[in-house]
Image (cartoon, grey):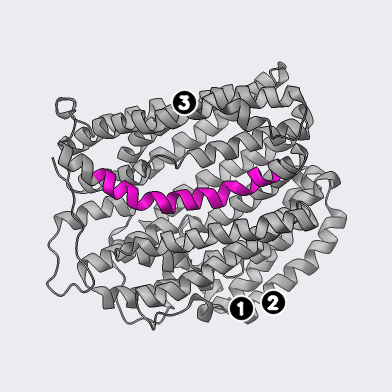
Amino acid sequence: MILSGLGWNTTSQIIIVATNVALTPFLLIHLGLAAYGVFALVSSFRGLLSNLDWGLGPCATRYFGVYAGAEDRKSTSSLLVTMSCMVFVVVGTVAAIAALVAPDLTVVIHSGAGLRHEATLLVRAFMPLYLVSTLRGLLSNIVGAEGRWAYLNVTATIAMLVDAGIAVLLIELGQGLMALFWASVGAEAVMLVTAAIGARRFISVRAMRFMPWAQVRELTRYGSRVQIAELANSFNMEIDALIVGLLFPVGDVALYAIGSNFSSGLVNLPLNAGGPIFVALSRTFGRFNLRRTLEEFTRLQRLWVRAVASFALIGAMSAVVAIPKWLGPRERLAGVVAAILLLGQAVRILSQVMGSLGKSINRPGLESRYLSVGMVANIALTVPLALSIGMIGVPIGTAVGVTVSTVYFLRIARRGIAPDIRSFFSEVPWLSVVASVLVTALLEVPAYELAPRGAAGLILCAVPAIAGLAVYAAMTFGIGDIRRWYSEHTGHRVGAALASEMLRKTASPMPLLPAIEQGATGTISAHLGELHRERYSSDVDGGGPADIPTV
């Protein structure tokens, strides 16, 4: 079920966010703001490198899913061998170059020589781990292609707890920043072993051979097409911390990283539904035609926008108050950073269904174009603002750039898909949004005065946000309906009942998609495999199945 997959993803993420909430103050106290900033810089550099793989990551996700849908273990095994060799060549080369130039990269850090030396050691130490994690990702893709989301999320949660435990232990023993590296090694070891165990049943050892060169060329062509989008997306996520590190003291990097991580954690909660929505639209396009897909898109977009329109805005109101109470008044700037980034993400969240539509109907170029525009706008705005008004100009430039690129995405979607495609702005219940944000802002004032310092203060400052979301839900979907749903369903069934009823209230005469009726727990890649195996109807409009290499 879609809600089942969403539930596993969200539950795992909540546990991980809670662990980070507990760990961050410990790191700030025992390492110091400057050392934490160095680690944040190294982490951003690793994030930027993670997508310099010639699109091999998305390529593996797609084709492992295709072969899983076709129940073709022979091709899965052959693809694993081929992709592993390609990862060794491409990612191994990138990692080796990064390790060699590490001293030249860290010399720009605004800190003492000791911290710069530790940063160089961290970069060099993380490069072999970067290669191992990329190889492990291939095994995880095989498990994910089979729809085993509970397994992946449980193991990821265990790995996160191992990471936190090792970090606390070694920092207490005086290992400093290298404690965080060894903590990452422990977490990666857990994920590597569990991924290998989970993937073993779907691999045929006898079929583990290199694919023919014609099929390798097909893989590289696909990877090259998605590399631009992946690189632009990674660049947009990681470049800000690197700009802060280049222009400002390393302590500011720590504050920016805290605010950025807080905003990302909140935004990713609703975005867990992105994969199932992608699946639903892709199955509609494969089974029917472009017209039916656009009809289903309109319905799903209305549901999505009405469900999340106020989420990031309420989060921004809460972040300004919650982070200083969580970490102390010295970290108030981190709260401002989180609030600004959440304001920028408020518009981008609304476009989630439209982004899924573009990829589901074989228009991936739309995503590449708008992400590239966002990257250019980000740099063009961020650097001048940072130089003129200080570090706070970085999140402001990022938020404006994200908003501009999202509006541009709506424009090119109308040109590249359909001129009358419905705007996500037209689905926003504006009165509910304004009311819920005002309620949150008014309640945060007394919450800030009453909240204690630490994690308890963070939780108390979240109460106004919950109240604001409740006001939004009541005004958007109706108090009577919510009470009726609650009286008819208990426990974990409440969420499923709400989502089911919300789908019904989207006023579309079409029946629910097969993906929703049958339960879509996998990613789009897994369902692409099923589509590859099915017969397409003769009235498909706007494209057919992609050419898939087979062994």
Residue 251 among magenta residues: no
Q: What residue appears at the point 53 percent right and 49 percent down from the top-left corner?
A: 235
**x%, y% of residue 173?**
71, 16
Tag shown at residue 96? 3
Q: Where is the C terminus found, in terms of image quarters?
A: top left
**x%, y% of residue 136?**
38, 31
Query: Disc 2 residue type?
Result: Ala
Q: Are marks 2 and 1 in contact (CB under 8 Å)?
A: yes
Q: Where is the N terminus found, in terms of image quarters?
A: bottom left
Note whether residue 90 is visible: yes
Helix, strand or loop for disc 3 = helix
Q: Quadrant of residue 149?
A: top left
Magenta region's main secondary structure? helix
484, 35: nearer the viewer: 35
Helix, strand or loop for disc 2 = helix
Tell me: residue 77, above or below residue 282: above
Q: What residue appears at the point 78 percent right and 27 percent down from the top-left corner?
A: 112
Mark before the other along the chain sequence, 2 or 1: 2
* Left or right of residue 362: residue 300: right
296, 50: nearer the viewer: 50
Mark before the other along the chain sequence, 3 or 1: 3
* Left or right of residue 76: residue 263: right
Q: Nearer the viewer, mark 2 or mark 1?
A: 2
**x%, y% of residue 152?**
41, 39
Residue 243 among magenta residues: yes
Mark before the other along the chain sequence, 2 or 3: 3
Q: Which residue is mark 1?
A: 475
Q: Which residues are magenta?
A: 219-245
Q: Which residue is mark 2?
A: 435
